[in-house]
Structures are given as structure tokens and as C-alpha cells.
Image: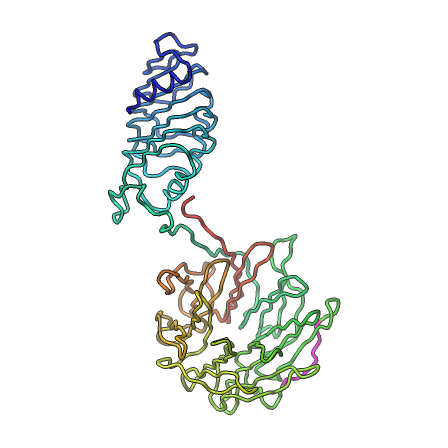
Amino acid sequence: MGGAGILLLLLAGAGAAVAWSPPKGKCPPRCSCSKESTLCEGPTELPDTFSTTLLSLSLVRMGVSQLKAGSFTKMPSLRLLLFTSNTFSVIEDDAFSGLSYLQYLSLANNHLEALPRFLFRGLETLTHVDLRGNPFQCDCRVLWLLQWMPTVNASVGLGACAGPSALARMQLDHLDPTKFKCRTTELSWLQTVGEAALSVESFSYQGEPHMILAQPFAGRCLILVWDYSLQRFRPEEELSAPSVVSCKPLVLGPRLFILAARLWGGSHLWSRVSPDLRLAPVQVLAPQRLLRPNDAELLWLDGQPCFVVADASKAGSTTLLCRDGPGFYPRQSLHAWHRDTDAEALELDSRPHLLLASASQRPVLFHWTGGRFVRRTDIPEAEDVYATRHFQAGGDVFLCLTRYIGDSMVMRWDGSMFRLLQQLPSRGAHVFQPLLIARDQLAILGSDFAFSQVFRLEPDKGILEPLQELGPPALVAPRAFAQVTVAGRRFLFAACFKGPTQIYQHHELDLSA
């Protein structure tokens, strides 16, 4: 049925006469008016001097480029509103607010590429919507429209897509809303923490999130907490630790331990026995074994907490330290003479595993059996790997391998070994850190010579794809990344060896808005 036929039905249903008679309000220029209906052709502005009892309005070839919110509030009785052959650059949300009786709305053939998300908000009485003949761009901007259609009782005419090219001439009502990828994330700079750092860790103590930085040049482990009044991170406590390379936290009920791994002067264990006390040194850790620590990790073995410290000295060996009474003592020496640069604890096949990267050979994988770590395999085609970090997604275990020269790599565990999945150019990289932030599996590839790159795992493809660069301010020799959630806000810390630590906030963006 044409617009005229529908108009007659609507007016008849409203008990209105269609005979022409002078309106109560003034009939604007370029318009033909009757008691209940008006047709305007070529007006230079949106008419608004109609009778408040107007039932039908048709606007053709207007010289108006914008429909602002509340444009028709002076015509609350409208049942039918037609736009034909107009060119709108902007239609605002709630442009039709106040039209609580509107039944028929036609925006056909008006050169529209997209519509605002809340255009139809409050139009509960709509029975017909005609949007055909518009060059809609079928990207994220039409997603809300596809999701809105099944929720209303109105008959909606959509027409075909004008773009993008892959969807040109496809009918909009044939599009699958579930195939649209209209959510993305962004990391925006928030705060700088002075002094260089080699590591950063998050931990929760007494229900509050904390961050700890290893700052070798400042000679300390620095603990930060969120200041709810200032809305920024502030120092809470610092531990004296000259030449520190890693500050590793462990929380056991009310007790807090901090392992401070140091290049010189011995590595120490600090402890706080209750929340009202300050941290104090309680133990020098394995002074004859920890010669040149380069990394420290926490892991649980047979229900007990342990630390593993990777040693990069020529004559040293990586040491496993497990809790025994009040302190932590050597349980096993691993990988002697290999100058280990990194340790990574992970679980494979429901068993604890340990992956050691070194300057002298490919990364070696150990598994826990019989109360000790035993060599299981190495990682093929992975020479010159400085560090490894793992993550889980979709039931699979993935591994990020950092290489300073050459390409860094992503591998996936196949049940017996890690196999190459992806290579990423990474000149000057010391860290390739996977992080799960909200629903996003990210991986950040730091660089000493270029911007650090943020990648996101695409579940459909099973690979990492570029998301954004971090900066400005640029990260200067990044060495570690960690994330923390505070009061519903998500933050990323970037510890840098030749510059200050930078803090970013994670935002989720809806591209269909």
C-alpha cells in the first residue's frame, strides 16, 4: 500500500476528516495545509507553526541538513511523518521525541548512510518504518538497527547496503548481527611513576589491590596503592633493595612476603606478619647459590609455595626455593652453567611445569614428578630466546617467546611440545607479555627502538592481531607489564629500564554507538 493509502487509513482510524480547511496554526511558506495534514516541498527551514492537532506531515526536498533532538515536539499528535528526497548530514538521537502517537515513519530516499542509535527511542506506537532507498554503510553503525528490528512490532523496510564493497547490494535484513565485530579496546595514558624499573607485579592484600615495582637505580622495591580521593596511584611502602631485579609478592592470609632478588649484596626475603606492621627483612636467601639473579617467579608445588630464581651467572644455576618453617630454602638446583635469563611456571596436562630460557641454548621444559623437576623437552626452532610467558585461551595453552634479535614468536601446546603458530618482528625486544584484561586477551611486545605494540587474540583466527601502539609518552626500554583492577577500572603498568613507569587505563569502546 502506498503512503497515501496508509495516510487515509491512519486518519480514518483516528476519526479525522480529510477535507481541506484552514488550520488553527499558520501555514508555513512552501507548504499546503489542511486541518489534519500538511505537505511541504522545498522549505529552507523545518516548519514549526502548525496546529498542535496535526496528524500527518510530509517534508519533501527541504533545504535542511540537520534534524536536531526534539524537532517535532510542537506536533505531539502526529500519526504519520514522511521525509522524501532530502539530504541530511546529521540526525540527532531523539529527533522524534515527544511523538508518542506516531504510527508511520518514512525516511526513504534521503541519502542516509547511517542512523543514530536512539533515533526511535520512545516511539512505542510505530507500526510502519520505511528506510529504503538510502545508501547505508553496513558497518558497525547499522548493528543497533539490526538488533532493534526483532524487538518491535513495526514492519520495517530496510533496502540494500551501499557499502562496504564486500556487502554492496546485499539486503540489510539478510545480514547476521552476530558476525559484526563492533567492540574494541583502547589503552590511554593516565599517570607516570618516576624512576626506572625492571619488574612490576600486582597482588591483593587485605582485600585491596597493590602494585610492586623493582627499581634498581633507586635501590628499592616500591609498593603502590590506589588513592580513592586523588584518583591516582600513590606510594604506600618501600623496601631497601640496591641493584634489585625482581620483587615477587606472596600473600598467605594476613602475612605478606616479598622476595627481593638482587644482583649484588644477596637476595632477601621480607615479611609483614600482620596488616598493622611494616615489612621487615627476615632472611638472606641461598647466598652461595643466587649469584646473579635475572628473574624470579612464584609457583605452588604439592600444596606449598615456592620461588624459582633464574641465575644468569656463568657458573650459577637456577634455584628452586620452597617454604620450610618460617623461611624459604633451596629445594633443587636446575640447569647449571647455562646462564638462565628467565623462568616461567605453567601447568600442562594437569601437572606443574617450568620453562627456562637461557643465553646458551633453546628454552627447556621441565615437569614436576617425584618431588623434583625433571627435563621433559626443549622448544625446537627457538634460538636466542630471552624470555617466555604463557596464557590460556579456548582450552589451549599458548606461549609468547621474546627475542631481542629476529622475530618473537607465538606457540601453541599440542600435547607433547610447543609448535610455532605466529612470528612477529621484534627488533630490540626484552618483553612479550600476555595479559587478560576484561574480556580481551592481549599481548604487549615491548621494544627498545620503537613504539611498543599491543596485540589482541582474535578467537576466530586463533592469532594475535595489532590493536594499538603504546604512547605517547613513549616507553623507554620497557621490561615488564602488569594489569590491575581497582574500583571497576582497569589499569596497565609498564615498567621501563631507561625511563619512568607509565600507567594506562583500559577502555572498552562500542563502535556501533
Residue 175: x and y, percent?
Answer: 32, 45
Residue 507: x and y, percent?
Answer: 49, 53
Q: State the residue in front, 305 or 155.
A: 155
Which scheme is used to colour this image of the protein? rainbow
Quadrant including the N terminus: top left
Q: In the picture shown, does residue 159 fall above or below 308?
A: above
Q: State the residue in front, 149 or 27.
A: 149
| Residue 496 located within the stretch drawn in magenta | no
Q: In the picture shown, does residue 159 fall above or below 236?
A: above
Looking at the rendered structure, the number of numbered marks drawn on it comes to 0
Residue 477: x and y, percent?
Answer: 46, 70
Q: Quadrant of residue 20?
A: top left
Please tell me whether the stretch drawn in magenta is mainly helix, strand or loop: strand
Quadrant including the C terminus: top left
The residue furthest top is: 21
Q: Quadrant of residue 129?
A: top left
Q: State the residue in front, 338 or 463.
A: 463
Residue drawn at point x = 62 percent, y = 79 percent: 304
Residue drawn at point x = 47 percent, y = 23 percent: 73
Q: State the residue in front, 153 or 171.
A: 153
| Residue 284 located within the stretch drawn in magenta | yes
Residue 355: x and y, percent?
Answer: 47, 80
* Magenta-colored span: 279-285
Q: Please indicate whether residue 433 sits to the left or right of residue 18 in the image.
A: right
